[in-house]
Image (cartoon, rainbow, N blue to C red):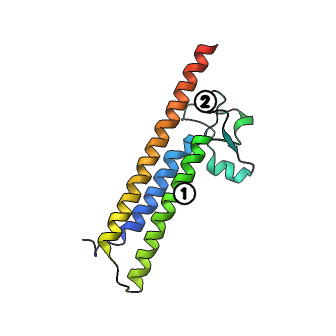
């Protein structure tokens, strides 16, 4: 199966990258009530703002960020993007090596590749889950503290 389905790894890598980006996009919302509200990254480029920074936490219109806060990226979202960029870069480099070795007919240790690729993919997806849980805790506890401080 390893030899017949070598092409599936690059396809799965693209799917993992899309899932990690979509799953982490809402982690970038900045709200003044977040426990981590003092730490944020300002994104000045309007095109990057639309790509990287979400303007609402969920589909509910009441979760939209204030207009003046839409250029701010929450620190947890930034950390998520950095970690995922590094992990996905390693995964895509492995995929590129796999493709080149198959096209150029270079000797390739598929068992070693599968072991490394699987570990990187699992770490990437686990880190995404941890980022989502961390942001939800920050958001939920910040909301709770904000309600009780009024």
Q: Position of residue 106 (x, y in %)?
A: 38, 85
Looking at the rendered structure, the secondary structure element under dot 1 is helix
Residue projecting furthest to the left? 1
Mark found first going from the N terminus, 2 or 1:
2
Q: Position of residue 53 (x, y in %)?
A: 63, 45
Name the residue rendered at 40%, 62% in the picture.
Answer: 12
Q: Position of residue 129 (x, y in %)?
A: 43, 43
- Between the C-alphas of marks 2 and 1, the distance is 24 Å
Front residue (pair 90, 71): 90
Horizontally, residue 40 falls left or right of residue 116, namely right
Front residue (pair 105, 87): 87
Name the residue rendered at 37%, 72% in the picture.
Answer: 7
**Residue tagged by mark 1?**
85
Q: Quadrant of the C terminus?
A: top right
Q: Quadrant of the N terminus?
A: bottom left
Looking at the rendered structure, the secondary structure element under dot 2 is loop
**Residue tagged by mark 2?**
34
Mark 2 closeness class: few <14, some 14–19, many ≥20 residues within 10 Å:
many
């Amino acid at each position: 199966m390893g030899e017949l389905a070598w092409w599936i790894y690059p396809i799965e890598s693209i799917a993992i990258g899309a899932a990690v980006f979509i799953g982490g996009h809402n982690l970038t919302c900045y709200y003044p009530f977040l426990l981590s509200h003092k730490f944020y990254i300002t994104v000045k480029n309007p095109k990057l703002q639309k790509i990287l920074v979400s303007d609402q936490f969920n589909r509910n219109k009441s979760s939209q960020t204030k207009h003046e806060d839409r250029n701010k990226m929450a620190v947890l979202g930034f950390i998520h993007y950095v970690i995922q960029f590094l992990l996905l870069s390693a995964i895509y480099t492995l995929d590129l090596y796999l493709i080149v070795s198959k096209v150029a007919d270079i000797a390739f240790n598929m068992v070693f590749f599968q072991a490394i690729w699987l570990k990187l993919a699992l770490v990437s997806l686990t880190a995404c889950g941890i980022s989502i849980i961390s942001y939800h805790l920050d958001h939920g506890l910040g909301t709770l503290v904000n309600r009780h401080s009024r």
